[in-house]
Amino acid sequence: MRTKLLLLISGLMFAVTLCNAQMTILHNFTNQEFPQCHLLQIGNVFYGTTLEGGANKQGYVFSMNKDGSGFKDLWDFKDTGTVAGNYNGSTSRNSLILLRNRLYGMTYNGGEYNEGVIFSISINGGGYKDLWDFTSATGTYPCGALTLAGNKFYGVTASGGASGEGVVFSVDTNGNNYIDMHDFSPANGYDPYGSLVVSGKTLFGTTENGGTGNEGTVYSIDTAGSNYKTLVNFNNFNGAYPEAALTLAPNGTRLFGTCEGGGSGFYDGSVFELDTNGNNFKTIFAFNYLDGEEPLGEVTLVGSKLYAMTDYGGEPYFLGNIFVVDTTGTGFQDLYNFDAVHGQYPTNGNDVIVSGDTIWGIVYEGGTNGYGVIYQYLNTPNGINTINADDGGLKVYPNPSNGAFTFQSTVVSGQPSEVEVYNMMGQQVYSQTNIPNSTFRIDLSNQANGVYLYRLISLDGSIVGEGKLILQK
């Protein structure tokens, strides 16, 4: 028994090590930067901005190679307020976009009125231009990224405008012809923190507050500034407080998004979808704290799967996680739980970049210095639950599960074999012998939520496969 427990502990250490090996920290921010943006990928280089830090402690624009090398501070914001039309901005919580070999973005503060600016800069960090200084009359404190449609940028501000509750604006790409297109109000929604998305001549966005339920809205507006419509009024049951931008399906007819709160069950946030005309709203997935809480970022759509992060929740650290769920609402997987060392609280609209089996993202806090990280996560199709076996392999699904786990293996087909399951204390909680088929199911619904180790043993006593099971009821 002592030997068996030692082997079990070794197996558990292997499982933890393998899980950590999937997460690689490409960059630890060091000087109270607190990055609060999406990564913009151009070829093999990422670009982004920070809220603070840099030479002037007012944030900066950075670049970094995709493999984590070559991190550069390209431009340090330093808003001195010296020359009208030539301010440097301050505290960028906004993401960048690319247009004709230049980066365009916004700062939350700074500018002639200290209420934010629109700026452009070359991809090598030179040629900074102050394109527009926000004012209280026409919108202050811009949020999200600029959206390009035709020869104009579109965006939102968190406050300012006629009602002081934020605006939808348009501006020429050279900074001319700024227009306050729509003034938000409690009745039609306010506090628009996410970027806009465009389909044809229609813009779509979210407000965190307001609407008939006073818990946020989804809205649309023409690029000409007319025909504003509230498509969804959130009311807690169908979600509450959406902070992130929407994601448009490739066919241009469906929208996907996240809510910080609400949703059925525990009201810990949700993923939702709807038609671009506002019909067929559906909650795809509702969170329950164990599998994540408060998804503040937008979802990344890859095929039929949605990838994103939550700001809190996720066992065992409850510091936020990376998750994936099918657009049908099935197949939810808690891919990685942040543990402070690898980041924590991936907050304020940060999304992920997905390419094949790899996910990249940026996290607001945590890491070696506590000021945020850029990470790379290897998302193998079945994570550590796919074990290479002698003549095929072993799969376990769904994992996490509320109790029933299905095992599928070509190795055990027709062979008497045994499955054993242990808790993290090394105590056996389940065993089944004489398994005749390649696919079989076990039921752990009588066990407590947590992580368990399984082993599949052949007739001659050799281990066919092993891994972890996550029980979430």
Image (cartoon, grey):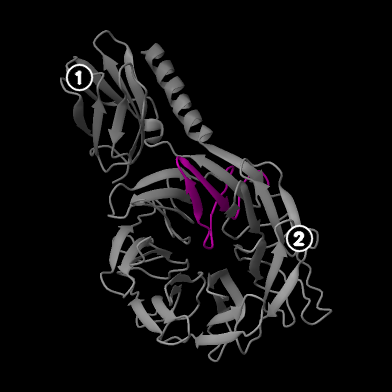
User: Which is nearer the eye, 43 or 34?
Assistant: 43
State whether residue 301 is above or below residue 450: below
Q: Which residues are magenta?
A: 341-369
Q: Residue at x 35, y 24 (%)?
A: 466
Relative placement, left or right, of 133 versus 336 is right
Relative placement, left or right, of 401 versus 129 is left
Relative placement, left or right, of 199 versus 265 is right
Q: Amino acid at mark 2?
A: Trp
| Residue marked by disc 2 | 75
Q: Residue furthest right?
A: 82
Q: Residue at x 62, y 51 (%)?
A: 46
Alpha-carbon span between mark 2 and mark 1: 61 Å
Would you say residue 378 sits in the magenta stretch? no
Q: Which numbered circle lies on residue 413?
A: 1
User: Which is nearer the eye, 5 or 438?
Assistant: 438
x and y, in percent, of residue 22 in the image: 50, 35
Q: Is residue 32 among what the camera can see?
A: yes
Q: Residue furthest top?
A: 460
Location of residue 237 (image quadrant): bottom left
x and y, in percent, of residue 385 in the image: 36, 31
x and y, in percent, of residue 321 in the image: 46, 49
Q: Amino acid at mark 1?
A: Ser
